[in-house]
Image (spheres, rainbow, N blue to C red):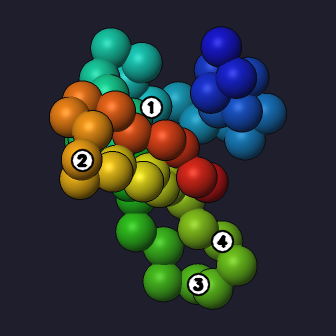
Amino acid sequence: SALRQIAKTLGKTDWNFEVDPCSGESGWATPNLQKGFENDVTCTCPENVTGYCHINS
């Protein structure tokens, strides 16, 4: 998948692909206080569509 390739390129070893990346769990969201070095997956989840989210960045 695209996320697996991104993880490989970035050297991410803490992303758990068994967990929904939009959940914010299992390493998908790691706060980084240094601007320009964000280290997480952000999603948009429309309120009117249950169970559907779109990964933004």
Label 3 vs label 2: CA separation?
34 Å
For the point 45% across and 31% down, the residue is 15
Label 3 vs label 1: CA separation?
20 Å
Kindly report which numbered mark, 4 or 2, lies closer to the viewer in this rendering.
2
Q: Earlier in the sequence, mark 1 or mark 4?
A: 1
Answer yes or no: is residue 24 visible.
Answer: no
- Residue 8 lies, in percent from the top left, at 71, 26
Asked which secondary structure carries label 4, the reply is: loop
Q: Quadrant of residue 53?
A: top left
Mark 4 highlights which residue? 37
| Amino acid type at image mark 3 | Gln
Q: Nearer the viewer, residue 34 or 53?
A: 53
Mark 2 highlights which residue? 48
Label 4 vs label 2: CA separation?
32 Å
Q: Earlier in the sequence, mark 4 or mark 2?
A: 4
Q: Quadrant of residue 36?
A: bottom right
Answer yes or no: is residue 36 visible.
Answer: yes
Mark 3 highlights which residue? 34
Mark 1 highlights which residue? 15
Q: Are marks 3 and 2 in contact (CB under 8 Å)?
A: no
Q: Are marks 3 and 4 in contact (CB under 8 Å)?
A: yes
Give neighbour class at mark 4: few <14, some 14-19, many 20+ (Cα, 10 Å). few
- Residue 50 lies, in percent from the top left, at 20, 34
Placement of the C terminus among the 4 image quadrants? bottom right
Q: Are marks 1 and 4 in contact (CB under 8 Å)?
A: no
| Amino acid type at image mark 4 | Phe
